Amino acid sequence: VTAALRNILALQPEYTTLHISGGRRMLENCVKEKIKANSSTKLIGVTMLTSFDDKEISEIGFRDSVPDSINKLAGLANDCGLDGLVCSPLEAKKIKSDFPQLKLIVPGIRRSSDETNDQKRILSANEAIINGADILVIGRPITESSDPAKAAEELSNEIQ
């Protein structure tokens, strides 16, 4: 992972993601690699897919609930020196309260008129921002809309 990160850092992206489930050693080595490269790229830890619920995470080996698992992952990411997290809007409020310095990138944004699709942990754009989201990730509500420009405008108006 650090070899891949070294190549990514050479491209100087603003952000790159790491799976927190890769564990402490991997995360700490990635932070060391960033420091060694004198990089300003923000290392963002991915917590858990917004399509997961307690049943699904149990099937892949998590013993705790989604919120408890995400709290542990967030704590590990913070302890290892990551710059931020990808988390659902439902977890954003607690994470921002516990770790205010972490930048939160939040998918799972839906309007009340949108299909939830496979997403289980969702909120509106405005609710996500109130909960502490710094950056919203909005895909299907725009890309699958019959009028993507209008959908994007409506979402933008929601947070104005």
Image (cartoon, rainbow, N blue to C red):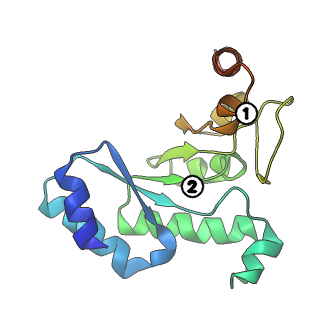
Locate residue 43: give its quadrant: bottom left
Q: Amino acid at mark 1?
A: Glu
Q: Which residue is mark 1?
A: 127
How many other residues sit within 10 Å of disc 2, few (<14), some (14-19) or many (≥20)?
Answer: some
> For the residue labelled by badge 2, is the local secondary structure a helix, a strand or a loop?
helix
Could you tell me which quadrant the N terminus lies in? bottom left
* Image coordinates for residue 12, horizontal then vertical, percent: 21, 46
Q: Residue at x 52, y 67 (%)?
A: 75
Residue at (63, 33) in percent of width and height: 129
Residue 62 in the figure: left or right of residue 55 = left
Determine which residue is flagged by label 2.
98
Q: Residue furthest front?
A: 146
Q: Position of residue 90 (x, y in %)?
A: 73, 49
Dot 2 amino acid type: Asp
Indicate whether 47 appears above or below 40: below
Give the secondary structure at mark 1: helix
